[in-house]
Amino acid sequence: MIKRNYFFLSEYILSLGLFLLLSGIFWLWDYDLYYSIFSFVFVLASFITIIIHRHQLTSLVKSPIFIFFILFIVYMLFSILWSKTDHSRFHIRSIRVSFFLIFTMLGTSLLTLHNERKFEIAIYSAGIVAVITAVFSLLYSFYNNITDNTELRFKGYGILYNPLLTAHVYGAFTTYWLTQFFLSNRKTSIIYFVNTSSLTILLLATGSRTPFLALGLVSIWLLLTMNKYWHGFLCLGLVLIFIFLQYIIFSHFNIWAGFSYRPEIWEYAVKQILEAPWFGHGAKTPFIMKYQEFIWYDPHNVELMVLYLGGFVGLFLWLAIYGFSLHFAWKYRSNKNVLITSTWLVFGIGSGLTESSYILTRPDERWFITWIPIILLFASLSAAQQQESKNLLVSSGVGQGKT
């Protein structure tokens, strides 16, 4: 009975929850509904699965990625104690999000350990939804611009309302299809190329340059991990062409924003960080910068945000997560899912250079460049390591049989 329940949870509910997490942001037009469906379906299924198969968590919780993942979350929760906030209110909310993150990470990993195919289908299906919504959104936006030429930059619809945040989400799936294109054969390469191109055009329409910076890093990562130099240099060339096209289009309308005040924001953030360099100002401490007629509420850089909130201790834990993730991603780069999810992680790193917010938030656009790539890569690595262990057992058994 237990095995039957696990079969149902792992193959259907968990994969459905992962699909909802990745695709719901495109078609659920309400944050609360998106959050509620995700927490009810995926988190609840993960929690039940973890309880039933807790004996299978040993290898997962021993991973350096998971250890530093937990240490970072716990440290950020403790940092609320010295932050300038209402401790009780933010503690409850942050603790709830932290448990959701842990359950999501373990639930996704258990899904890949027992049915990696369902894991692949969930991401692939969400990628299809991303392409479909991108095409229809662009057509509808183009139609609106013809009738009412007021919004030159594509902002998105429903939950997606900000050009930069919209670019994060669609850019993540652009990375997914680009990697699939690198891995594809002649029969499927055209489909993946069309999907990548459709999403890239949407990124161009947002007027945001950050995703193209991130895609440049992605191209380098793919070039190094796959040794397909012709594809890699072609991708880098296309990224530069799209940046040039974006400059030509948006500078004509005087909305090419230069550096978007990033140097001024970063300079102010560094000054604030130096006031509490080791342990930071504490999680949930407001960041407010007034410059000219603008007000910013975050330093627009993930690492600076971690430094501001958690100091050098928090930054060390944060970088350790990424360091071990990239280390194992390089080690298991021959695994298809590891390569796909690690490329997504690299995109997140690039996007995080100019964007940030509070780290322990409920699922939103920023999850697609922070927590989601870490969770997906950890799950892929877990499956790859399990397969490696099985291969070693088989080879050692064969060796013993010969002797």
Image (spheres, rainbow, N blue to C red):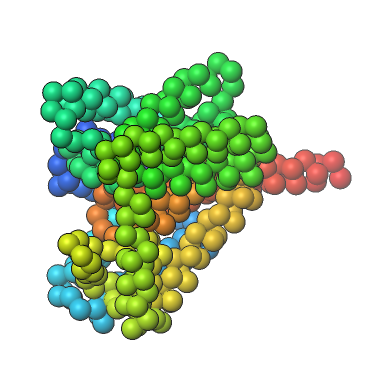
Q: Residue at image x 54%, y 61%?
A: 323
> In the rendering, at what x and y percent does residue 59 appear?
52, 57
Q: Residue at image x 53%, y 28%?
A: 181
Between residue 149 and residue 235, name the one nearer to us.
Answer: 149
Between residue 57 and residue 92, name the one nearer to us.
Answer: 92
Q: Which corner quadrant of the image does residue 263 belong to?
A: bottom left
Q: Is residue 303 left or right of residue 183?
A: left
Image quadrant holding the C terminus, namely top right
In this orientation, does residue 389 appear? Answer: yes
In this orientation, does residue 356 appear? Answer: no
Between residue 245 and residue 79, name the one nearer to us.
Answer: 245
Q: Is residue 110 left or right of residue 283?
A: right
Between residue 123 and residue 177, name the one nearer to us.
Answer: 177
Q: Is residue 390 left or right of residue 33?
A: right
> In the rendering, at what x and y percent does residue 273 appear?
35, 77
> In the rendering, at what x and y percent does residue 156 appear?
23, 37
> In the rendering, at what x and y percent does residue 5 appear?
34, 39
Q: Residue at image x 28%, y 72%?
A: 283
Residue 312 sits above or below residue 295 on the image: below
Q: Residue at image x 44%, y 42%?
A: 212
Q: Which corner quadrant of the image does residue 211 belong to?
A: top left
